Image (spheres, rainbow, N blue to C red):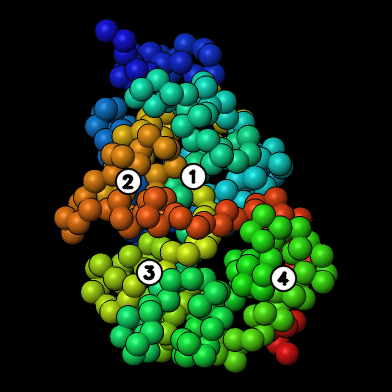
Amino acid sequence: MKLTKTLMATTALTVAGAAVHAQDMADSMTMVSWGGAYQTSQINAYATPYQAMHPGLEIVWDESSAEAVAKMRAMDEAGNVTWDVVDVVAADALRLCDEGLAMEIDPEVHLAPAPDGTSAEEDFGDLLVGDCFIPQIVYSTTFGYRTDMVPAGVEAPNDICDVFDLETYPGKRSLEKRPINNMEWALLCDGVAKDEVYDVLATAEGQQQALDKLGTIKDDVIWWSAGADTPQLLADGEVFMGSTYNGRLFSVIEEQNQPVAMMWDAQVFDLDGWIIPANLPEDRLARALDFIYFATDTQRLADQAKWISYGPARASSAPLVGQHADLGIDMAPHMPTDPANAKNTFLYNYEFWADYRDDIDAKFQAWLAQ
């Protein structure tokens, strides 16, 4: 019988092409994530079953993912890297990789194939951005709206450009207090083709065009900084529609039973996943790689969706998404990657924002202050 590397972990496993025995792996591991419901989903789907396979393994959690770049720089400078597996957004993974602070990953060696034998590289596909990033979930920034505030005789909003249509859909909007996503949506709704958005946004004229479009609704916008802001504004009826992370909207709709619905059109896909710090000692590296192999296989990524409405990064995981562990509802229709929700998506351009973020941020903040 052919054993997977995960099942072989208690006797021997392959790490970067070298045989490593279980006794050569560290007996503790420090993992870094975001806290809250998301970290809980990781504990339930990944950490707890992995520890069950490895009795005696201690996992310590650190909730510092938001400061991962700065903290890893400081650790590297001090020559004392205490983290083993770190959850970061894709953009931060690219920065850490470029600076040599994250280890390069070979999908064919370090990640499990799909159950049908499809290679990990093919199964993750375009979501394998960068050389060091191991995608875990696809989440999106999208819009929710109050169903009881839709004007009589008017179809519920279902197009991203409805956000800019104050005549048909009067009422306050909430938008994140940063240019990312807002600038892209503005250009899409000012007639720029999806595949040309970043070419236009790279020019001073295009940046002004986006700001001008946003200016048409600026007086009706409440600007948010925390992901919880829009759900609260919607729950309180202070805005008609607003952007936030799809998981936050899932909570306000399904867990709080508020009169809110999702508007998936032009949702902006973003990625979150793992990196392994560069230059770990051999025993800690072996443990980190063994965990990553297990935690990013097809079944584990599907399992995480039992606790959070973010889409698994593997194509082979999507058909395995089942019901919410507590609510008992089917989770597939709530995933940003579900075909019914992903008819018109927009993929965040990490490289563009790495190059232009500082300049556009300055322009955006100056525009806000006007």
**Which residue bears the numbered disc 3?**
262
Report if the CB atoms under discs 4 and 3 are less than 8 Å apart: no
Q: Which residue is mark 4?
A: 361
Answer whether residue 71 is visible to the viewer in this image.
no
Q: Whole-Å distance between the Cαs marked 4 and 2?
A: 34 Å
Label 2: state its secondary structure.
helix
Find the residue positioned furthest to the front: 153
Secondary structure under tag 3 reads: strand
**Residue neighbourhood size for the residue with mark 2, other residues' Cα within 10 Å, grouped as few (<14), some (14–19), many (≥20):** many
Against 186, is 72 above or below?
above
**Residue 171: x %, y % from top left:** 46, 90
Q: Is residue 249 above or below residue 213?
A: above
**Residue beneath the point at 74% across and 64% down:** 201
The residue at the point 26 percent across, 35 percent down is 49
Q: Amino acid at mark 3?
A: Met
Q: Which residue is mark 2?
A: 304
Q: Point out residue 217 in the picture as x, y percentages from the top left corner.
A: 59, 86
Cα–Cα gap, marks 1 and 3: 25 Å
Residue 322 point in image, percent of width and height = 24, 46
In the rendered image, the quadrant that contains the C terminus is bottom right
Label 4 element class: helix
Per the image, label 1 sits on a secondary structure element best described as strand
Under mark 2, the amino acid is Gln
Label number found at residue 273: 1
Q: Amino acid at mark 1?
A: Gly
Tell me which amino acid carries mark 4: Asp
**Residue at 71 percent of width and 42 percent of height:** 99
Between label 1 and label 3, give the one nearer the viewer: 3
Whether residues under marks 2 and 3 lie with C-beta atoms below 8 angstroms apart, the answer is no
Q: Earlier in the sequence, mark 4 or mark 3?
A: 3
How many angstroms separate mark 2 from mark 3 (CA)?
21 Å
